[in-house]
Amino acid sequence: MGPSDEPSGLRAGLRGLTTRGRSFLAAGLTAVVCSYLLGQDALLRVGVLLAALPLAAALLLANTRYRVASGRRLSPHRAVAGQEARVHLRVDNVSRVPTGLLLLEDKVPYVLGPRPRFVLDRVEPRGHREVAYRVRSDLRGRYPLGPLQLRLSDPFGMCELNRSFAASDVLTVVPQVLPLPHVRLTGEWAGQGESRTRSLATAGDDDVILREYRAGDDLRRVHWKSTARYGELMVRREEQPRRARATVLLDTREIGHRGSGPASSFEWAVACAASVAAHLLERGYQTRLLTDTGRAVPGTDDGHTAADTSGVILDALAVLELSDGAGLSRAEEPLRAGGEGLLVAVLGELDEEQTARLARLRGRTGGAVVFLLDTGTWTGLRMLAPGTGGEEFRDRARRLREAGWTVLTVAAGDSLPDLWQAADRPESSAPYREEAGA
């Protein structure tokens, strides 16, 4: 790709004169006028030389036909919040003449850092130069990079002309994904290991699905009764267990969260949802993300691989914003349509009605885990210690627990892996149990 077309000629060159070039031109014109007034021929020659130098540089630079191409490569394209990404720039001189001094400046949002600038002294014909810079953001989101701006300069620094490329790229900054321990979740039936449904193990002889023997098949799978019937080796088909389904429900209501910036309860909830979704996908669950707005990611298409689904969910979480919703009712219909499966909810502050709805919803799921955020600890209204939640908060947690939810109460500063470790122990996942029963 080449630079965009700009006006050329002496007029364009004069607009690009630097302070040095303008000073030389002004000094030259002044010397010419003084030589006329004073009758000094030597001063006239000096003035003409001073004025001619910036004019010649401007004319030469404005009419130079450099053909320059550029390319940009991101490593990685999807960065994690708080970690650096590297941007590689390549400039190719595709013309038959060497370039002069080139100044490169890539346009980046201020949250990624200052604009990177590079100076390339000379690029030979058909040659190229590569430079790189780093960007970093503590805030998730999608950030445009580019377009690349190219500044041409003459060797004397008299004139500079700007050219701009049209192409740009997008860097996606996703929430941090924490590794979670492997725990046996209540209600899981088709995920991994012992909890996987073995449909063929319980099938009778009449229900066995057979196929012809192929080289390399395990002889232990030979179905001798059918082999005798058909006169050729027949084997049982490989078991195709049904995949477990899981839904990660994320509360994005603005009224349900406290704090601001990366340290807010909402950002903790987003990182929690990302980590849980990635963990469940790794364990073989067919996982989707659902928000209180009723939007599910991915949609009804089940053709995604685990890696694709993880990328789609992380991309959606990268740009997720707080909603103006007042409750969780819009998420109930997608949950009912999804059928039974594991439900992991990450919720902010709840009122009486929302708690009652969640309690009734528990009966429609195979297993239910809720991260219940004590949002008051994100504003400093309460101490950051277990057992210090308000009375209403403890009551909400108790009611959800009585309805069958595995409740993991969360305060600011809590470790997500430590909380997840208690997900398989419903009776011990209530740090406020003693206070609530006092």
Image (cartoon, rainbow, N blue to C red):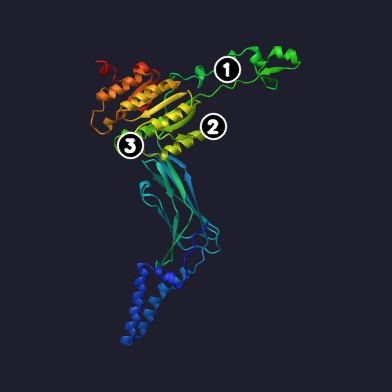
Closer to us: 125 or 331: 331
Q: Earlier in the sequence, mark 2 or mark 3?
A: 3
Q: Residues within 10 Å of mark 1 (few under 14, many from 20)?
A: few
Under circle 2, the secondary element is: loop
Above or below for 66 versus 220: below
Q: Amino acid at mark 2?
A: Asp
- Mark 3, other Cα within 10 Å: few <14 / some 14–19 / many ≥20: some
Q: Residue furthest bottom?
A: 39
Residue marked by disc 2: 302
Q: How many marks?
A: 3
Residue 9 shown left or right of residue 40 in the figure: right
Which residue is painted at 60% across and 20% down in the image? Answer: 239
The residue that label 1 is drawn on is: 199
Identify the secondary structure beneath mark 3.
helix
Residue 38 makes an appearance in the image:
yes
Left or right: where 353 falls relative to 365: left
Q: Nearer the viewer, residue 393 or 138?
A: 393
Residue 430 in view? no
Q: Name the amino acid, label 1.
A: Ser
